Structure formats: C-alpha cells, structure tokens
Image (cartoon, rainbow, N blue to C red):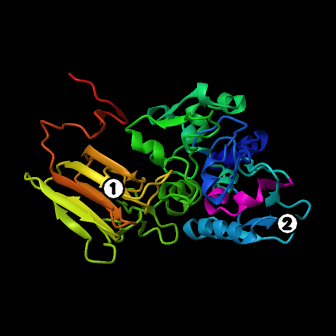
C-alpha cells in the first residue's frame, strides 16, 4: 500500500509542477574557437540536477533535427551520451502530434533548452544556431538541460567554489539569475564540483569589456578551466548515470574507488575515471611511451620528477603508510590556452575524488604547493611544443607541518578543514 501511494503521489507532484530551464546564447563574434564564450542566460533559478519538480524521460527518447543544423555533430553528441549512460535515444523523422521527444530547431541568434521532461503532448524544443549545433560540447550542454541538469556554477554549494562579480555583467538578465535556490529542490548526488564541467559558464560570460564575471574562489588557475565546450567531463556523465541508472544497481554491494561509479550494465564492476582501470578502478593505466610511471612511491625524502619536450606522460605517486603527498611544483611550461582542458597541458589530481577534473595548467606557472587529500596523486603531462616541460618534487607529507589538504599559488593558500577549501588563516 505504501509503495503504491508513494508512486501515485510522485506522479501527481511531477505532473503539477512544470520545470523550465532556458539557455540563450547570444551571437557575439562566433567562431569555432569562441564557442566557449557563448553568453548563457537562464530563465529560472537552478542547481545541479532537478529532482522534485522535473521528470525523468521515458526511453528511448525520440528526437528529430531541423533544417540548417549540423545533424552529424548533433547525432555524435547524442551518441556519446547514450554510449556512456543507460539513456537511450531514437531518431524520429518528424514531430508526430501527441508524442513526446526532443526537437532540435534552427534559431539565428540563440541556443536554448527547457529543463527536463514534461508530461505534455509536445516535443521539448532545443534551439540551436548553426554554429553551436556544430559544437559537440555545446549540444551536450543543451541536451543535458533537456535531461534536467542545470549549470554547475548554480549548485547550492557554488559559493564555496566561485565568485560571481555582479557589477561586471553587461546584461541585467544574467545578473538577476545569479541567485541561489533551496537545497532540497535539486540534488548533486554527492558528485564533486567540477570547474571543467561542460555545464559551467566561462569567466567572461556576459562580461563588460576587460572584466570577468566568474572567477574561482580558489587559486587563480582554476578560473582558466571554466567554460569549456569540448565534451562532457567524467563527472558530467556520472551525474546523469546516478540520476537515471542508479535504481538498476540498488542492491549491489560493489564498492567503487577513486570517484568511479557502478556499471549499470552489470552492477558487478565500475565505470572508471579516465586512465583508471580494474574492476573497482583501483589501478592506473600508463600512457604509451617510455616516460610514464604509475608506480612512484613517496617517502620521507624529496624526489624529483621532471619531463620536457613533445610527449604524453602520466604518473601515479602513492605511499604505503596512508600519508598525504607533498608536491612542490617548481615550474610548468605548456602550450598556452584561453581555456585549459584535460589533455592540453599539465593536470594534477590531488583530491580524493579522482573523477573530478584535476587542476589543469596551460602556459607558464611556478611555485605551486599541494598537499593531497589522500595517499595518492595522479599527474598527466602533454607537451605540445619543444619548449614545454615541468619539474616538481614530491615526498610524504609531514602531518605536523601539513595537517590539512592544502594548495598554494602566488602566496595564496587554501586549506580543506571540513568539506571545502577556504583561505588559510594563521593561528
């Protein structure tokens, strides 16, 4: 009786409340390289993924693509979602009256999508310009909205991660919609905040000239990770899976590691973050070549790690005593990029959750100090030019000297004493 009543009440609640989300991307000197600077505009307040007022889609989800859009890119973006999740789609030649689905529609000036499935006899409309319909990440951004995901920077906990500079907005509509929302209307499913999420605004979204509207409330390099539209991150995909696929494995006893999550197909193994492998994602796969080493051990003595030139390398540093890892980055010199993404420079994962995009560095940096959250650190180096390289030193962290996970850059340090990184204060 209780379960039947719960189902009825849930249906009625979902039917009564209409959940709307729209992104409007204004054309502003659009080129393929500047797709990341589309100025998103949201109609309603939102956080991570809508739970109480939005519905999951019945599957497969029919979709159709209108004229003047890049159908191949849209299909590729959809296929990447369906192959990475339990969510399925089926292409429909038209929009049959009375059916549900997603309809991609040409628009000359905006990209927009409503938030989540509505129990009405209409296709959900996703508006795309020809330019943004050719961007895999931008299409995934809008489809994620249709799947009821909201912007990363509008999570309930965003004030611990970013600053929003309201006086720098050139558009009052953007400024108004920087407000927060009640925690119980949306869920993060305990997925970590990810500066590189495809659902994150860039630092100059709707900004006045020579200003930033969004900056990281952490060390400055994180600011240059925000706004990428190449593709969904591991955590972007994980959030969809936890919402749409979790029920399939509710009785599984498998314990995934390093930020991994249960494989919805088997419920007996895990979907691993990039480069991680094994049933429970407890091992690291080295990149091809001779420079990688995924078995480095941190001891009390400092050890140098360096590389240079055009090559791809990855490293795992760990210790056997469950101590945190001390990392002193002397310098990083990688190819500059306006938005630094995975695989484009130097990346270090020092959080316990290795599914979250690590700190990505593109360009020239020096003198960063990191104390990891746990006893293993993952690093990738992608040298694109002959002059690229890095040098760091690592060791076991001394607990008395570094009792908390820490990151420092340009004489600014942040410590994680509870759940979030906050500016370090001298005792």
User: Which residue corresponds to the image point at 63% horizontal and 64% vertical from the top-left?
Assistant: 87
Asked where in the image residue 167 lies, by quadrant, the reply is top right
- Foreground label between 2 and 1: 1
User: Which residue corresponds to the image point at 59% horizontal and 30% vertical from the top-left?
Assistant: 180
Q: Is residue 130 visible?
A: yes
- Residue 286 versus residue 413 in the image, above or below: below
Residue nearest the observer in this picture, 16 or 251: 16
**Dot 1: element:** strand
Residue at far front of view: 387
Residue nearest the observer in this picture, 416 or 256: 416
How far apart are the alpha carbons under marks 2 and 1? 45 Å
Residue at far right of view: 97
Residue at far left of view: 301
Q: Which residue is mark 1?
A: 333
**Residue 385: percent from the left, percent from the top?**
38, 66
Q: Which residue is mark 2?
A: 67
Magenta residue check for 84: no
């Amino acid at each position: 009786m209780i379960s039947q009543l719960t189902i009825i009440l849930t249906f009625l609640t979902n039917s009564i409340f209409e959940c709307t989300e729209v992104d409007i991307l204004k054309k502003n000197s659009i080129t393929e390289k500047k797709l990341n600077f589309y100025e998103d505009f949201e109609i309603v307040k939102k956080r991570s993924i809508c739970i109480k007022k939005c519905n999951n889609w019945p599957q497969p989800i029919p979709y159709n693509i209108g004229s003047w859009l890049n159908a191949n890119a849209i299909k590729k973006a959809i296929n990447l979602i369906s192959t990475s999740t339990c969510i399925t789609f089926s292409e429909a030649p038209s929009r049959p009256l009375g059916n549900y689905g997603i309809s991609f529609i040409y628009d000359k000036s905006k990209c927009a999508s409503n938030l989540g499935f509505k129990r009405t006899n209409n296709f959900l409309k996703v508006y795309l310009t020809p330019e943004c319909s050719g961007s895999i990440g931008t299409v995934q951004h809008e489809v994620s909205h249709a799947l009821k995901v909201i912007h990363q920077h509008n999570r309930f906990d965003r004030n611990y991660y970013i600053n929003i500079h309201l006086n720098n907005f050139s558009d009052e509509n953007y400024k108004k919609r920087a407000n927060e929302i009640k925690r119980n209307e949306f869920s993060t499913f305990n997925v970590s905040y990810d500066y590189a999420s495809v659902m994150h605004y860039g630092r100059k979204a709707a900004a006045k000239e020579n200003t930033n509207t969004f900056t990281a409330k952490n060390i400055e390099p994180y600011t240059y990770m925000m706004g990428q539209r190449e593709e969904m991150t591991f955590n972007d995909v994980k959030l969809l899976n936890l919402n749409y696929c979790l029920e399939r494995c509710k009785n599984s006893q498998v314990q995934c590691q390093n930020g991994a999550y249960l494989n919805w197909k088997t419920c007996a193994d895990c979907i691993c973050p990039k480069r991680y492998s094994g049933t429970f994602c407890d091992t690291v796969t080295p990149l091809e070549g001779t420079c990688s080493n995924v078995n480095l051990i941190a001891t009390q003595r400092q050890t140098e790690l360096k590389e240079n030139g055009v090559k791809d390398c990855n490293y795992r540093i760990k210790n056997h005593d469950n101590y945190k890892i001390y990392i002193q980055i002397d310098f990083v010199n990688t190819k500059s990029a306006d938005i630094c993404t995975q695989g484009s420079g130097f990346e270090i994962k020092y959080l316990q959750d290795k599914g979250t995009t690590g700190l990505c560095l593109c360009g020239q940096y020096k003198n960063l100090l990191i104390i990891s959250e746990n006893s293993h650190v993952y690093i990738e180096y992608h040298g694109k030019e002959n002059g690229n390289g890095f040098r760091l030193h690592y060791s076991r962290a001394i607990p008395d000297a570094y009792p908390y996970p820490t990151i420092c850059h340009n004489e600014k340090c942040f410590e994680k004493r509870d759940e979030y990184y906050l500016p370090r204060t001298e005792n």
